[in-house]
Amino acid sequence: MDALKQIAGSSMKENKPQFTIGDTVKVHCRIKEGDKERIQLFEGTVIAQKHGGIQETFTVRRIAHGCGIERVFPVHSPNVEKVEVVRSGHVRRAKLYYLRDRVGKAAKVKTKING
């Protein structure tokens, strides 16, 4: 078990991205097409964070052409280049699965007011 922890510890990112549930983020994801690589952006609202340690993941939801799209990203994956926070959200839940049932302005998350 200790050997697994050592292997996991060596592959974890030192500067883990700092964001919380409800934040709108841009995820820079490395996409491999044939022998070429490019960076693809996925912008949306963080609706869930799960697990911990090396297997930690977060779910990002966005609406594209009237259809809801959710992607699950591993935090420590080498394919996730960086995560930048566009807007901080103010929520009172740990999981925002209720946003799946809402459309339009009802699916918006309040912005956090610093003050």
Image: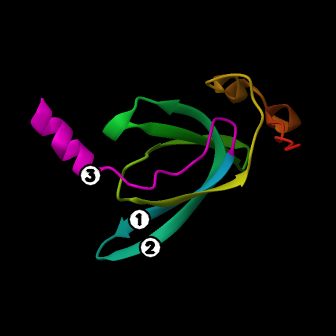
Evaluate if marks 1 and 2 touch, with contact meaning CB atoms under 8 Å apart: yes
| Three-letter amino acid code of the residue under disc 1 | Ile
Mark closer to the chain start, 3 or 2: 3
Q: Residues within 10 Å of mark 1 (few under 14, many from 20)?
A: some
**Compared with residue 111, is residue 33 higher up or lower down, i.e. above or below?**
below
Q: Give the image location of residue 5, x and y in percent.
A: 20, 37
In three-dimensional space, the C-alpha distance between marks 3 and 2, rounded to whole angstroms, equals 22 Å
Q: Which mark is residue 11?
A: 3
Q: Tell me the quarter of the image containing the C terminus.
A: top right
41 vs 5, nearest the viewer: 5
Instruction: Kindly identify which residue carries mark 2.
Output: 38
Magenta region includes residue 50: no
In three-dimensional space, the C-alpha distance between marks 1 and 2, rounded to whole angstroms, equals 5 Å
Q: Give the image location of residue 108, x and y in percent.
A: 81, 37
Q: Give the image location of residue 106, x and y in percent.
A: 85, 31
Q: Residues within 10 Å of mark 3 (few under 14, many from 20)?
A: few
Q: Tell me the quarter of the image containing the N terminus.
A: top left
Instruction: Kindly identify which residue carries mark 1.
Output: 31
**Compared with residue 24, is residue 56 higher up or lower down, i.e. above or below?**
above
Q: Residues within 10 Å of mark 2 (few under 14, many from 20)?
A: few
| Three-letter amino acid code of the residue under disc 2 | Arg
